[in-house]
């Protein structure tokens, strides 16, 4: 930004202070920069099996491109309402679930208010908070030597951080970039203790990857059931992860109808495009694909965790579709070295680091072949990186 340009200087100070979100490096960019052709991307937690086949089939019949989409998202809301047994009035559609996070910030936060979230939380919480001039109260996470959940969210500490100016609490379960999660009793106690005027944004971008039996025995909370009981919960879900529709940008929020009506006031009239709505309806019904994706992820997660353990690399507990692993070398150097191997991962540190994770990288669980390839590539590059000063 040019210092001298009056129109740039006139922008809001808290907006100028934002560091823009850094996305996973695209395959095409690595192809261009390194002249490589055989590249895998395990950087953005996308589904290695691709998009739901039912969604792909639906897109062979494109909706009319010259007409605006259904701004009310009738068909998609209907499908979501049936699938989750919620009223359509309690559903808000978003241009990715990212959109929902911003809508919550816009409706609830302003200068003089604050949002509470954990250290190592999803980077967008800080961005959405900053963009509306509110303060972020970042609560220290559980310590690295915590016996159950190193780097996990410390819910009692988050509860204690809530003050009279707090309007929103952001919590991802499982969390990105750590993979950590909170269990049912802990979340229940937290939700019950949060003042009813504070909006709890419960971000379940990865919850479809949690084994179904974990919900039954309380190892993982049923966020949907909680959202039905507590009107101050906004539950967010996405089609970008297990459904494999990241390119289309579609997600949704489930909330009490009176909260949904608030968020509806601040969204764009046509925030979810017609192709995305059309494909999402089909993807939601593709149970077989979801099950296959979950099974491939389960196996891959175990394989990656085992490969790391064998090599003495410590991994943060994960119940998502990625592992976050400590390699003892600054993450940016590992990232650069792997690019030359045609493997794109995500270095922590910088924006993806609210403290203490700069030697960690996040690796998305891929297919068995992709998982083997990233481990083999790490085996090749790490000795030289560790030897270099
Ligand atoms: C990927 C992700 C999202 C979803 O982003 P979309 O905008 O729906 O693509 C939301 N929250 C977390 C924690 C994520 O990792």
Image: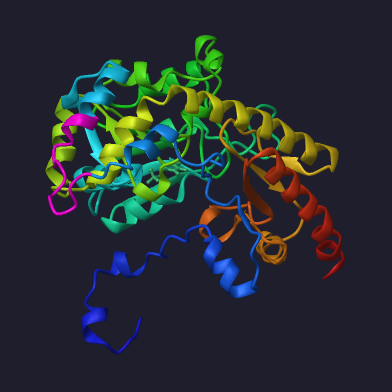
Q: Residue 295 location in percent, x, y?
A: 60, 26
* Residue 353 vertical placement versus 198 (above, below): below
From this viewpoint, is residue 166 visible?
no
At x 29%, y 43%, the residue is: 276
At x 21%, y 82%, the residue is: 7
- Image quadrant occupied by the N terminus: bottom left
At x 47%, y 19%, the residue is: 221
Dividing the picture into quadrants, the one containing residue 59 is top left
- Image quadrant occupied by the C terminus: bottom right
Ligand 1 located in image quadrant:
top left
Q: Residue 72 location in percent, x, y?
A: 14, 37
Q: Residue 53 location in percent, x, y?
A: 44, 35
Q: How is the image coloured?
A: rainbow
Dividing the picture into quadrants, the one containing residue 237 is top left
Q: Residue 185 location in percent, x, y?
A: 49, 15
**Magenta highlight range:** 63-76
* Residue 225 vertical placement versus 74 (above, below): above
* Residue 263 vertical placement versus 378 (above, below): above
From this viewpoint, is residue 289 visible?
yes
Instruction: Pick the residue in front: 205 or 65.
Output: 65
Q: Residue furthest bottom?
A: 4
Q: Is residue 177 magenta?
A: no
Q: Residue furthest front?
A: 60
Side of 293 relative to 287 (left or right): right
Q: Is residue 72 magenta?
A: yes
At x 25%, y 21%, the residue is: 81
């Amino acid at each position: 930004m040019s210092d001298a340009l009056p129109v740039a200087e006139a922008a809001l100070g808290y907006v100028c202070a934002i560091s823009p979100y850094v996305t996973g490096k695209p395959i095409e960019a690595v192809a261009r920069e390194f002249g490589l052709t055989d590249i895998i991307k395990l950087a953005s937690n996308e589904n290695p099996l691709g998009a739901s086949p039912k969604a792909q089939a639906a897109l062979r019949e494109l909706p009319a491109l010259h007409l605006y989409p259904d701004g009310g998202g009738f068909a998609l809301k209907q499908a979501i309402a049936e699938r989750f047994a919620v009223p359509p009035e309690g559903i808000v559609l978003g241009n990715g679930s990212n959109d929902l996070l911003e809508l919550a910030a816009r409706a609830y936060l302003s200068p003089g208010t604050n949002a509470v979230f954990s250290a190592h939380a999803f980077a967008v919480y800080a961005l959405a908070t900053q963009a509306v001039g509110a303060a972020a109260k970042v609560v220290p996470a559980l310590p690295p030597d915590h016996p159950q959940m190193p780097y996990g969210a410390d819910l009692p500490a988050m509860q204690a951080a809530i003050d009279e100016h707090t309007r929103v609490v952001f919590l991802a379960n499982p969390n990105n970039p750590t993979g950590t999660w909170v269990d049912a009793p802990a979340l229940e106690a937290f939700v019950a203790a949060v003042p009813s005027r504070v909006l709890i944004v419960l971000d379940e971008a990865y919850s479809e990857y949690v084994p179904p039996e974990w919900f039954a025995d309380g190892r993982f909370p049923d966020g949907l059931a909680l959202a039905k009981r507590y009107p101050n919960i906004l539950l967010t879900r996405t089609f970008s992860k297990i459904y494999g529709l990241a390119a289309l940008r579609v997600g949704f929020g489930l909330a009490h109808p009176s909260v949904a009506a608030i968020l509806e006031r601040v969204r764009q009239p046509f925030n979810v495009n017609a192709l995305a709505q059309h494909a999402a309806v089909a993807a939601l019904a593709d149970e077989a694909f979801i099950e296959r994706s979950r099974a491939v992820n389960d196996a891959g997660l175990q394989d990656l965790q085992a490969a790391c353990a064998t090599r003495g690399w410590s991994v943060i507990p994960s119940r998502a579709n990625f592992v976050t692993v400590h390699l003892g070398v600054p993450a940016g150097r590992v990232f650069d070295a792997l690019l030359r191997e045609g493997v794109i991962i995500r270095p922590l540190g910088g924006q993806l680091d609210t403290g203490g994770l700069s030697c960690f990288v996040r690796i998305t669980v891929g297919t068995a072949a992709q998982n083997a390839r990233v481990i083999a590539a790490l085996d090749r590059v790490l000795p030289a990186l560790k030897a270099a000063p």
